Image (cartoon, helix red, strand yellow):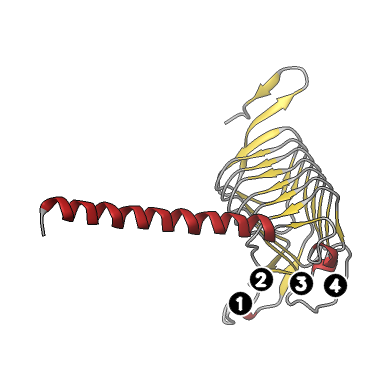
Amino acid sequence: MSGETVREDSSLVVWIKRRRSELIHGVWERIKRWAAVGTGHRVANRFGAFGEGSYLGFPTGTIYGERWIRVGKDTLLADHVTLSAGMHPDQEMVTNPVIRIGDRCLIGRYNSIVGHFSIEIGDDVFMGTDVYITDQNHTYTDVDEPIGRQIPVESAVKIGRGSWLGSGVVILPGCRIGENVVVAANSVVRGVIPDRCVVAGVPAKIVRRHDSEDGWRRPPT
């Protein structure tokens, strides 16, 4: 076989692989668009509320307990988002809704919102990727018992309107975040965070706060 023929065969193989890859990518993009959930979709109708103009990307993460979850208007839930209310799909909950997501929110890819009692996310809250929010944690009252077997406790979580949660943020039970708060990437947040501030770290602490008279200020060291 001549060198010219080998080059032609090699070019043909490369062309076939490229075309095959382009075809697969094109089909997958169409599947994601066609399988996305919007208002009136059978999946959307399982939710306690699913507002007009809201959108749930495909593929989804784990989703169950939809009737205890309410999504506002014009909210985007990206692909691979996990939403769950309770320990299992058929559990009867003591509060309704367990999870409430406001209007015009952006829930980033691979976010997990795991509710058992009350998680409230205000309007216009944006989140990066891989954010984890829960209102339940295991206790550690018996040092000899495996922690995973000890009775969990719930404490309501609230995230104020207009806030931004960076990628990798963890929101712990009982956390109450004010309005227009920035949570830096990879922070772990607990307790009460006031309005109009920036928090960062593990555990998250205020690094900047806005004063109505003096503008942005750093807390004293």
Image coordinates of residue 209 in percent, x first then y, are 68, 29
Would you name the residue on which mark 1 appears? 148
Nearer-the-camera pick, 103 or 205: 103
Q: Disc 2 on helix, strand or loop?
A: strand
Upstream in sequence: badge 2 or badge 1: 2
Kind of residue indicated by mark 3:
Gly
Q: Badge 4: few (under 14), some or many (20 or more) residues near its Cα, within 10 Å?
A: some
Amino acid residing under circle 2: His
Alpha carbon separation for disc pair 2 and 4: 18 Å
Q: Pointer 2: what residue?
A: 138
The CA distance from mark 3 to mark 4 is: 7 Å
Task: Classify 208 as above or below 93.
Answer: above
Percent across and percent down for residue 190 are 67, 52
| Between 124 and 170, the one nearer to me in the picture | 124
Instruction: Say left or right for 199 vs 163.
Output: left
Mark toward the start of the polypeptide (1 vs 3): 3
Query: For the residue carrying disc 3, how many other residues have a C-alpha within 10 Å: few (<14), some (14-19), or many (20+)?
Result: some
Closer to the observer: label 2 or label 3? Answer: 3
Residue 92 figure quarter = bottom right
